[in-house]
Amino acid sequence: MRRVTIEPWEYEHACNVGIQRFTRNWLRNDAAHYDRSKMEDDRTAQVASALCELAVAKVSNRYWHAHVWDRRDHNIYRNLPDVGSNIEVRRCRTRDAVAVRRTDAGKVIFAARVVGDEFREVDVIGYGKADDLIPMLDAGQDWGYIGFEFLTVLE
């Protein structure tokens, strides 16, 4: 695991991206599999996710395009990676596991979590090739959680 310190200007930028993502999805309904009772508020989740993406960009030395689009354009841009040309960043909040989707094929999955109440640091836990992680999903399962022990840990 590598702890990344977020600089003030990075913090401001990532928080702005998170808030923009939140407002672009203001009237969008939750996905059917979401359980609102287990979730944090969307504003916090969007900001934390943007900070995780920024931290992964820093440790991987890849471009973070900080994408924000209108909810009506989701189908156009939904397959864009979060960082670089092939990195998906998954924020891990309550489990020592990372979400992996079959649609992640060909990408690299990074697991990250914000630290503390102010999110000034991010732990980038590790990464794995989706093509190596997807076979761990149960047959017929579109997505699932894969334990951190199956990731390559950053030193």
Image (cartoon, rainbow, N blue to C red):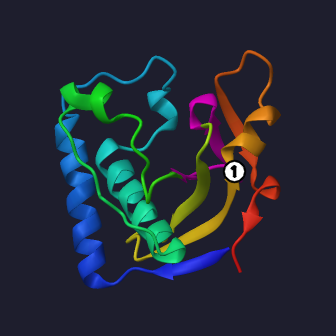
The residue pinned by badge 1 equals 129
Instruction: Report crowding for label 1: few under 14, some 14 to 19, many 20 or more residues within 10 A (C-alpha).
Output: some
Q: Quadrant of residue 132?
A: top right
Q: Quadrant of the N terminus?
A: bottom right
Say whether residue 91 is magenta. yes
Residue under the image location 24 percent in, 46 percent down: 21
Q: Which residue shows up at 24% across the image and 44% down it?
A: 22
Please indicate whether residue 86 sits to the left or right of residue 46 in the image. Answer: right
Between residues 21 and 85, which one lies in front from this camera angle? 85
Residue 13's image quarter? bottom left
Q: Is residue 63 above or below residue 38?
A: below
Q: Is residue 38 left or right of residue 46?
A: right
User: Of the residues shown, which amino acid type is indicated by label 1?
Assistant: Lys
Against 50, residue 144 (above or below) is: above
Q: Nearer the viewer, residue 48 or 38?
A: 48
Residue at image position (57%, 71%) is 123
Badge count:
1
On screen, residue 16 versus residue 124, left or right, reads left
Q: Is residue 131 above or below residue 141?
A: below
Residue stretch rendered in magenta on the structure = 90-104
Query: Can you give x and y, in whole percent of width and height, for residue 124 in the image?
Result: 58, 68
Quadrant holding the C terminus: bottom right
